[in-house]
């Protein structure tokens, strides 16, 4: 079935939906979710996996179109909103202004969080730091042979599966609490899949099949781990409830795969949706500011989950128009300068 909307509008809307899933997952720690309680069932981690797939595809497309000044453009795209999120986080969780905080702040500004530290000052930015490392590796990844890039994707997934089993067996930290850059080998596989989709359009069907198998493997590993847990504790009768929860999480990955199927098969159109693109534009601010907004709103005595989420979305729109809008303008300026220099 042909979709009239163009692929970038659809991907923008998908980014917003994924950001909303992550935000709703964190919202549960600040207020009773009520009628919103079904949203976190879609899986914050699966939403992150979807983000990484879309990010890899977008970066691969951008680098293919204009490799000159790539990192410079990325910096203008990321830093304005990120620095604003750091300031907002300082307001929400006032730090002690000492040398230790200064060192923490510097590490986070330089995106060495999750390398030299185990956590990120802006909580959700642990995934952003992973993306930054992959951005830095993009010129090198672009030169790799296709079979080597595909091998790296599968090796990363194998490492992820091993860590998932060990995390359950030995109570190891979640990825948001890992240091020493361990997230890079553990979580690169979905980003690399998206990157391959963009870099090798002739092999897109195979790459999308690989990605589908990886997503299926992730769910099956989760089923195996949960089944083992229930068996160990004599609770196998509870496995049906677990399978229901996992089916919700699987539906998030299915949605992303179906979207990319439409793109790969040429089933998207050429109509640009301003509304969808606006949703996509505010998804990045929403992702990095929502925790701080929830804390600030809870601090003034508001306990309505709907109002907290509305405040986070309003703040994201303000961040877009007051900060990100100008960052994008500077990114476009940097792009023009790169093209002029290349010419």
Image (cartoon, rainbow, N blue to C red):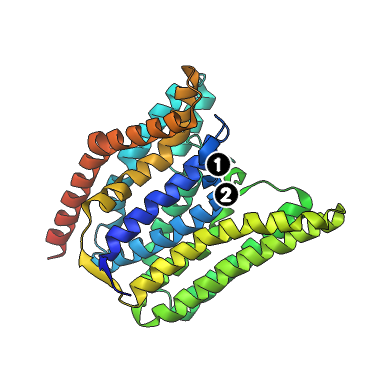
Numbered mark located on residue 37 in the image: 1
Q: Which residue appears at 54% of the width and 26% of the height?
A: 100
Q: Which residue appears at 27% of the width and 45% of the height?
A: 76
Q: Residues within 10 Å of mark 2 (few under 14, many from 20)?
A: some
- In which quadrant of the rendered view does residue 79 lie? top left
- Determine the CA span between mark 1 and mark 2: 7 Å
Q: Which residue appears at 21% of the width and 40% of the height?
A: 326
Marks 1,2: beta carbons within 8 A: yes
Using the image, determine if residue 252 lies above or below residue 194: above
x and y, in percent, of residue 260 in the image:
39, 69
Using the image, determine if residue 136 lies above or below residue 291: below
Q: Can residue 213 be seen here?
A: yes
Name the image quarter holding the C terminus: bottom left
The total number of labels drawn is: 2
- In which quadrant of the rendered view does residue 51 lie? bottom left
Left or right placement of residue 40 versus residue 105 in this view: right
Give 64 or 300, whichever is nearer the viewer: 300
Q: Which residue is mark 2?
A: 41
Give 104 or 88, whichever is nearer the viewer: 88
Q: Can residue 199 be seen here?
A: no
**Label 2: element kind:** helix
């Amino acid at each position: 079935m042909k979709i009239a909307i163009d692929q970038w509008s659809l991907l923008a809307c998908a980014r917003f939906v994924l950001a909303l899933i992550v935000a709703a997952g964190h919202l549960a720690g600040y207020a009773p979710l009520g009628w919103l309680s079904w949203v976190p069932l879609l899986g914050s981690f699966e939403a992150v996996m979807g983000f990484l797939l879309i990010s890899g595809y977008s970066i691969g497309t951008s680098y293919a179109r204009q490799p000159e000044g790539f990192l410079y453009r990325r910096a203008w795209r990321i830093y304005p909103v990120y620095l604003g999120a750091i300031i907002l986080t300082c307001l929400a969780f006032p730090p002690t202004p000492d040398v230790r905080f200064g060192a923490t702040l510097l590490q986070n500004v330089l995106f060495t969080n999750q390398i030299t530290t185990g956590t990120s000052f802006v909580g959700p930015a642990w995934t952003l730091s992973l993306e930054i490392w992959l951005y830095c590796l993009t010129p090198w990844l672009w030169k790799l042979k296709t079979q080597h890039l595909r091998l790296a994707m599968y090796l990363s997934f194998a490492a992820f599966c091993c860590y998932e089993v060990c995390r359950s067996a030995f109570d190891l930290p979640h990825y948001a609490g890992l240091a020493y850059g361990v997230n890079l080998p553990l979580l690169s596989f979905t980003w690399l899949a998206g990157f391959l989709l963009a870099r090798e359009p002739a092999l897109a069907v195979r790459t999308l099949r690989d990605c589908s198998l990886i997503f299926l493997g992730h769910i099956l590993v989760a089923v195996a781990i949960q089944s083992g847990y229930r068996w160990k504790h004599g609770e196998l009768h509870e496995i049906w409830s677990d399978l229901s929860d996992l089916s919700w999480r699987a539906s998030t990955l299915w949605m992303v795969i179906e979207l990319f199927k439409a793109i790969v098969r040429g089933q998207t159109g050429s109509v640009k949706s301003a509304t969808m693109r606006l949703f996509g534009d505010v998804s990045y601010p929403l992702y990095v500011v929502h925790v701080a907004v929830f804390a600030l709103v809870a601090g003034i005595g508001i306990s309505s989950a709907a109002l907290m989420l509305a405040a986070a979305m309003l703040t994201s729109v303000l961040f877009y128009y007051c900060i990100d809008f100008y960052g994008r303008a500077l990114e476009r300026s940097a792009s023009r300068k790169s093209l002029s220099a290349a010419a």
